[in-house]
Amino acid sequence: MARKLVECEHCKGQGVCTGSGGRSCRACLAAAGRNIHQWATVRCSYCGGIGRLWVETDEEDEESANSLAG
């Protein structure tokens, strides 16, 4: 299995969670140790605030994509 770096779908690559109407969602607030009722923007708990995630990909899929491109 190969790994590929992709944009975090939760924070859309920003690194901070603003998924709940301009403030952070409950999961990210709880991961940051904040009360879920606070109006705060905290780092994304899914990607750790970097805006990107490592995902596992099949090597066969990559090889077929490379053969089509080249």
Image (spheres, helix red, strand yellow):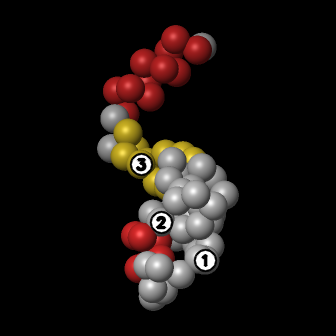
Query: In the drawing, does residue 14 fall left or right of residue 61?
Result: right
Q: Nearer the viewer, mark 3 or mark 2?
A: 2
Q: Residue at the location (48% across, 86% down)?
A: 34
- Kindly identify which numbered label has been placed on residue 40: 1
The residue lying toward the viewer, choosing from 56 and 8, is 8
Q: Residues within 10 Å of mark 3 (few under 14, many from 20)?
A: few
> Tag 2 or tag 1, which sits nearer the N-term?
2
- Kindly identify which numbered label has been placed on residue 49: none
Query: In the drawing, does residue 23 fall left or right of residue 47?
Result: right
Labels 3 & 1 near each other (Cβ < 8 A): no
Where's residue 56, x and y in %?
37, 46
What residue is pinned by disc 3? Answer: 55
**Can you say whether 14 is above or below 28 in the image?**
above
Where's residue 9, x and y in %?
51, 48
Q: Secondary structure at mark 2?
A: loop
- Kindly identify which numbered label has been placed on residue 25: 2
**Can you say whether 38 is above or below 24 in the image?**
below
Q: Amino acid at mark 2?
A: Cys
Q: Residue at the location (38% across, 39% down)?
A: 57
- How far is mark 1 from mark 2, CA to CA? 9 Å
Q: Secondary structure at mark 3?
A: strand
